[in-house]
Image (spheres, rainbow, N blue to C red):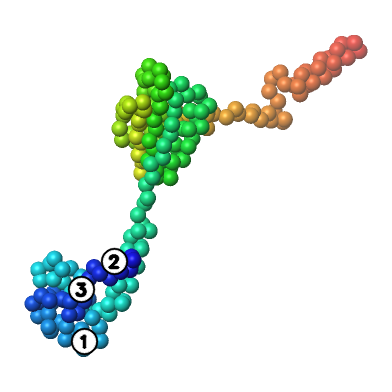
Amino acid sequence: MKNDKIKNQYRVNDQIRVREVRIVGDNGSTVMPTRDALNMAREQGVDLVEISPNANPPVCRIIDYSKFLYQQKKRAKEMKAKQVKVEVKEIRFGPQTDEHDYQFKLKHAKEFLEEGNKVRAYVFFRGRSILFKEQGEVLLLRFANDLEEYGKVESMPSLEGKKMFLYLAPKKAGVAKKSQQARDREASSADAKEAPKPTVKVVDAEAPANGGLLANAKISADALKKLTEETDD
């Protein structure tokens, strides 16, 4: 079905019934009568293919039609492969979500945004819990703040029926803005690395400092010698 759709997009040879056409090729373009273009294509053993019917005059190529279709299918496949499929991932909260559950869902939201997906977070108010809608709004705002490195807010929290929604889109790679907390942590880490290391004082054994162990030993020896001389006297 897809092949037939591509095939039916173009008119070929006798299907082209305008008076003149513009022939494009590697050497530029030329306007000529359609009959002459058809004769040229037949002489080369290929086809006259209309590629731009809305131009004035219509633009055509002289090319093998099967080869032309193959090129078009290949180009369409390459373009499809390059397209980034963006999905919308949902994160659901209750108005009184506990911290463990919050951190678990925050982790998943980071993964979704890093993969290039959008995130739709919402707080569901069941029954009388709608009385805590302000608490739900605070929760979503905290969620957006904790994800500022990974996503940007597309719309602020808004109440729709029993649900309050927050929409986040992924930031482009390499331009994620770091939170103040992350910057503070990095600054503290850098300061710790730059802190002066304790110096080790090397004592020259040949020249001991006053009060050193060797100096005390020398003083004791001199005193003993002096005492011996006094005794002999």
Marks 3 and 1, how far apart in space? Answer: 16 Å
Tell me the residue at 36%/63% (across/down). Answer: 77
Q: Which of 146 and 103 is in front in this view?
A: 103
Q: Where is residue 222 in the image (x, y as percent from the top left)?
A: 80, 18
Assign the N terminus to one quadrant of the image: bottom left
Give the class, few, some or many, for how many residues have Cα within 10 Å of label 1's Cα (few <14, many ≥20). some
Q: Position of residue 8 (x, y in %)?
A: 25, 69
Q: In the rendered view, would you say 55 is above or below 134? A: below
Marks 2 and 1, how far apart in space? Answer: 26 Å
Q: Seen in the image, is 188 located left or right of residue 213?
A: left
Q: Where is residue 218 in the image (x, y as percent from the top left)?
A: 78, 21
Q: Which of marks 3 and 1 is in front?
A: 3
Q: Residue furthest bottom?
A: 43
Assign the C terminus to one quadrant of the image: top right
Residue carrying label 1: 42
Q: Where is residue 207 in the image (x, y as percent from the top left)?
A: 70, 28
Q: Seen in the image, is 152 located left or right of residue 25?
A: right
Q: In the rendered view, would you say 140 is above or below 114? A: above
Q: Which of marks 2 and 1 is in front?
A: 2
**Cβ atoms under marks 3 and 1 closer than 8 Å:** no
What's under tag 1, amino acid-wise?
A: Arg
Q: Seen in the image, is 184 located left or right of residue 217?
A: left
Residue carrying label 3: 11
